[in-house]
């Protein structure tokens, strides 16, 4: 288990934000805003899932895992709080968060599954998707070059921590003797829902702003998703890797995250452990 650092991000998230904050680009601004709307509910689920998984371990293993899970929870709780503030600005701009309500409904249905490994497997799958997104953000910083400094740094910091704790849920799932069939099935389910929800929420934002049917919006979408440095184009191979029998998240590069955290230490401080 790699050591995790719980950080407080030292940026202003109280000042209101503009609509097309990413250099005036409607599509990319809407895409990131849609992602933010899923995070508070999703991250609460991850925290609860790993706590439940920890409780299901034999006592000696619980002791070995406890501090690591607490640090994972600390990172995710900080992400949740900042994205709550971010989403309050989006609400003030008139955007409705339909993604969160759909997530709450699906997660509620999962309570019928008594085996905690199902929720851990869902967390494993989602964490891999967010790691793909995080690596894409960090490897292509020019995509956020025209964003306000505080928003650019928030996304880069979040991406760095997602990569830092990319192995936690996966390793806990293995410690719980989770089987490979569940892991791969849940990835297919989670991926389908995630992509559909992301498209729906992004389109709702664009429709709200009268940008959905503009040719410039679709040109931007093609660039961001399918262009030379597009998310879907570059992320597809990482997604397929998940289904290999010998897959482990540590196979994904973490150097961009380590470099960003080391080079921007003025933007965060470590939270003291009690």
Image (cartoon, grey):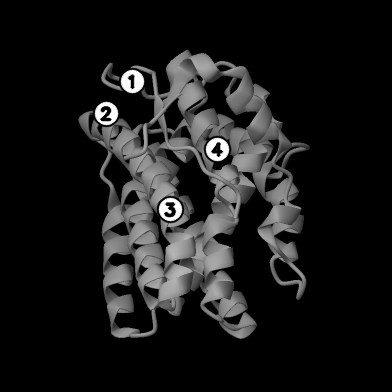
In front of the other: 234 or 74 = 74
Local secondary structure at mark 4 = helix
For label 3, the residue is: 67
* Residue located at (59% from left, 27% from top): 261
Query: Quick one: label 1 or label 4, which is nearer the N terminus?
Result: 1
Residues tagged 2 and 1 counted as in contact (Cβ below 8 A):
yes
Query: Quick one: label 3 or label 4, which is nearer the N terminus?
Result: 3
Task: Give the foreground label among 1 and 3.
Answer: 3
Q: Is residue 114 above or below residue 105?
A: below
Mark 2 and mark 1: span between their CA atoms? 6 Å
For label 1, the residue is: 17
Mark 3 and mark 4: span between their CA atoms? 22 Å
Disc assigned to residue 89 = 2
**Residue 114 position within the rendered picture, expressed as x and y whole percent measured from the top left:** 33, 85
In front of the other: 144 or 118 = 118
Query: Quick one: label 2 or label 1, which is nearer the N terminus?
Result: 1
Mark 1 and mark 3: span between their CA atoms? 36 Å
């Amino acid at each position: 288990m790699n050591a995790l650092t719980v950080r407080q991000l030292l940026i202003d998230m109280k000042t209101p934000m503009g609509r097309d904050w990413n250099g005036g680009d409607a599509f990319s601004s809407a895409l990131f805003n849609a992602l933010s709307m899923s995070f508070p509910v999703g991250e609460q689920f991850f925290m609860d899932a790993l706590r439940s998984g920890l409780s299901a371990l034999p006592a000696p293993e619980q002791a070995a895992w406890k501090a690591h899970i607490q640090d994972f929870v600390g990172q995710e709780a900080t992400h949740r709080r900042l994205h709550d503030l971010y989403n309050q600005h989006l609400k003030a701009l008139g955007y409705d968060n339909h993604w969160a309500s759909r997530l709450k409904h699906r997660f509620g249905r999962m309570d019928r599954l008594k085996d905690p490994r199902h929720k851990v497997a869902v967390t494993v799958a989602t964490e891999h998707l967010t790691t793909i997104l995080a690596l894409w953000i960090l490897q292509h910083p020019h995509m956020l070059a025209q964003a306000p400094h505080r928003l650019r740094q928030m996304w880069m910091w979040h991406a760095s921590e997602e990569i830092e704790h990319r192995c936690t849920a996966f390793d806990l799932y293995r410690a719980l003797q989770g089987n490979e069939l569940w892991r791969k099935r849940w990835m297919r389910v989670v991926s389908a829902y995630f992509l559909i929800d992301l498209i729906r929420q992004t389109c709702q934002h664009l429709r709200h702003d009268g940008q959905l049917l503009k040719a410039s919006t679709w040109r931007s979408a093609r660039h961001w998703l399918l262009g030379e440095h597009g998310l879907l184009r570059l992320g597809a191979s990482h997604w397929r890797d998940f289904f290999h029998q010998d897959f482990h998240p540590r196979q994904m590069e973490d150097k961009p995250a380590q470099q960003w955290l080391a080079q921007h230490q003025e933007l965060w401080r470590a939270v003291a452990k009690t």
